[in-house]
């Protein structure tokens, strides 16, 4: 068994008294590719922010790479939701990716210069180098998504956290994003959240369900019981990519 | 052009040019951070300092600096913590600042009509000392922006990511608000408290329609600011109207005209093959 990189035990988060996460326990191991699904408002983004140390739980323990989250977060590549950004914000694509290099400010100029060289490589890898002088807000959802992944890669992370990576991507290109992530998973631990059960495709290795409570058996299969508990209603699920179906066969 | 023979008018023109520099740079950050109303709150809170300055027989501008900085750090700290409900606090500080100023000016008694110049601006009162202070602030703004350009761009675009990569986001945000407060006090001398936010926001807002890089927006906003202040001053002199208001009117008219002038191409999808077609827009 590989070593645990993220460990949450009995984590509860409340916003103004309203529960966002209730007693969530989760262990993510090095090399995992975990997909967490759940309805909107189910606490998915909150869970990522807890791992990043941006939200402090009222109870429970969080450990990332054996440290407190705020100490470990510079080793996490965070890819927020594309739609969180103001489309009129005047920033060029290359400047967005260069943000990753701010991490190296405290390590002196040499490592920062090194990082700026990595920017081109990361952008080429994500196929956004040609877009470098364009305004971020003028790109398509899929292009912006790849820019944000490139930015996260520039920080040379050990863990990649993605918030709804396919929500603003045309369904034809969701597969492309998953292929990219699948390749990255060869060297990185990946954890993503999504409200869309359909997009948890054959690329993800493990699946958890989250609706304030987390249902997770460390496996890829989602049981009907997990879905019932998560969505509180029977969910009619069409499993795409039949050879690797996520749902158990009915009957 | 015989106006240029008057020293006060030459001073006013130079002041207009100085103000344009700080306004363009700080105003750009104000616009992209959507803190126009925090800036308005800072400006109006400054009036409290002016009233206290008059009451204690100190320099009113010094009082304004203290009050605007306090308001900036107060609102900055609260708005950093909670993104919601900040508008109520802004409104309260806005009004309470004004009230303090008015009450202390009353208590001071005597001739307080001079305080009107802080509300509506008065280029007649701009002294050589003011010019030196304005030049000093310009230098300060230029240096800090040169040093922190990338960092301020990052915290404005994505504060959470900036924090994750280890930037002390709050510190940079408060530093920006502090400079905003100083700029507000300086601009107040030109156009008055009531119209400060217009001169800070209109030039960058116009520039933002035509340029995508922050540096270009700042440079173009600077040119626009200079154009508006100089044009406004000449018109106000020839028509014998309040100069601050005329500057703002010129800026406002330019803003509305710019709304009708074709902005930067919105849909210039690149022709390079990026593995995707053009049409994978907003799906959710």
Image: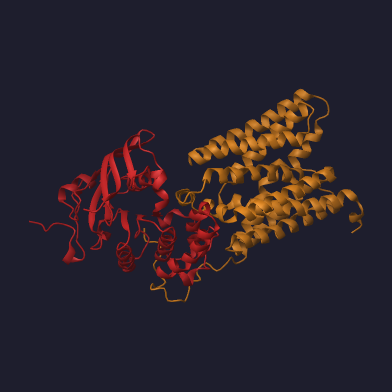
Q: Colour of chain B?
A: orange
Of the 4 image quadrants, the one containing the N terminus of chain B is bottom right
Residue A67 found in image quarter = top left
Residue A178 image offset from top left, x and y in percent: 30, 64
Instruction: Residue at 75% x, 59% y: name it.
Output: B227
Q: Colour of chain A?
A: red
Instruction: Residue at 47% x, 76% y: name it.
Output: B271
Residue A134 image offset from top left, x and y in percent: 52, 67
Q: Is residue B133 left or right of residue B34?
A: right
Residue B269 is at least partly visible in this image: no
Instruction: Residue at 86% x, 51% y: name it.
Output: B9
**Count of marks placed on residues:** 0
Of the 4 image quadrants, the one containing the C terminus of chain B is bottom left
Q: Is residue A154 above or below residue B95?
A: below
Q: Is residue A34 above or below residue A46?
A: below
Residue A204 is at least partly visible in this image: yes
Q: Which residue occupies the foreground of this view, A159 or A83?
A: A159
Residue B116 image offset from top left, x and y in percent: 77, 37
Q: Which residue occupies the foreground of this view, B30 or B146?
A: B146
Q: Is residue A21 left or right of residue B123?
A: left
Q: Which residue occupies the foreground of this view, B245 or B83?
A: B83
Residue lying farthest left? A251
């Amino acid at each position: 068994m590989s070593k645990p990189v993220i460990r949450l035990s009995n984590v509860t988060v409340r916003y103004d008294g309203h529960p966002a996460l209730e007693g969530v326990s989760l262990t993510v191991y090095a090399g995992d590719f975990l997909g967490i699904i759940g309805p909107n408002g189910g606490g998915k983004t909150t869970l990522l922010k807890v791992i990043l140390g941006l939200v402090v739980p009222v109870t429970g323990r969080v450990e990332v790479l054996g440290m407190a989250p705020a100490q470990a977060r510079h080793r996490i590549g965070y890819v927020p939701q594309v739609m969180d950004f103001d489309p009129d914000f005047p920033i060029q694509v290359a400047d967005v990716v260069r943000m990753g290099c701010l991490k190296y400010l405290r390590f002196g100029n040499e490592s920062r210069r090194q990082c700026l060289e990595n920017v081109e490589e990361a952008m080429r890898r994500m196929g956004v180098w040609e877009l470098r002088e364009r305004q971020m807000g003028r790109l398509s959802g899929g292009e912006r998504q790849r820019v944000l992944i490139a930015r996260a890669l520039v920080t040379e992370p050990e863990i990649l956290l993605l918030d709804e990576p396919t929500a603003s991507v045309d369904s034809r290109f969701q597969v492309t994003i998953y292929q990219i992530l699948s390749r990255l998973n060869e060297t990185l631990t990946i954890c993503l959240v999504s409200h869309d059960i359909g997009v948890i495709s054959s690329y993800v290795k493990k699946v958890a369900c989250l609706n304030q409570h987390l249902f997770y058996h460390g496996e890829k299969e989602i049981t009907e019981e997990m879905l019932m508990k998560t969505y509180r209603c029977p969910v009619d699920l069409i499993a795409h990519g039949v050879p690797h179906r996520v749902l158990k066969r009915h009957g | 052009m015989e106006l240029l023979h008057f020293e006060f008018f030459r001073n006013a023109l130079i002041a207009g040019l100085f103000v344009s520099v700080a306004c363009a740079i700080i105003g750009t950050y104000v616009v992209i951070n959507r803190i126009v109303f925090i800036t308005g709150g800072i400006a109006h809170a400054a009036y409290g300092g002016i009233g206290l300055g008059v009451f204690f027989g100190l320099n009113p501008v010094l009082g304004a600096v203290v009050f605007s900085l306090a308001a900036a750090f107060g609102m900055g700290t609260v708005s950093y913590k909670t993104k919601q409900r900040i508008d109520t606090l802004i409104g309260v500080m806005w009004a309470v600042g004004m009230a303090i100023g008015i009450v202390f000016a009353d208590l001071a008694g005597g001739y307080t009509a001079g305080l009107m110049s802080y509300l509506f601006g008065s280029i007649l009162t701009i002294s050589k000392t003011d010019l030196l202070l304005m030049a000093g602030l310009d230098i300060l703004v230029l240096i800090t922006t040169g040093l922190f350009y990338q960092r301020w761009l990052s915290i404005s675009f994505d504060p959470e990511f900036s924090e994750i990569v280890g930037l002390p986001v709050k510190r940079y945000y408060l530093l920006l608000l502090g400079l905003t407060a100083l700029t507000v006090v300086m601009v107040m001398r030109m156009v008055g408290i009531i119209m400060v936010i217009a001169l800070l926001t209109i030039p960058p807002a116009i520039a933002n329609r035509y340029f995508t890089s922050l540096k270009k927006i700042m440079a173009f906003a600077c040119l626009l600011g200079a154009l508006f202040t100089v044009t406004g001053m000449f018109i106000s002199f020839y028509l014998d109207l309040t100069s601050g208001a005329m500057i703002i009117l010129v800026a406002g008219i330019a803003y509305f005209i710019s709304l009708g002038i074709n902005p930067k191409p919105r849909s210039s999808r690149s022709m390079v093959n990026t593995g995707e077609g053009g049409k994978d827009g907003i799906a959710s």
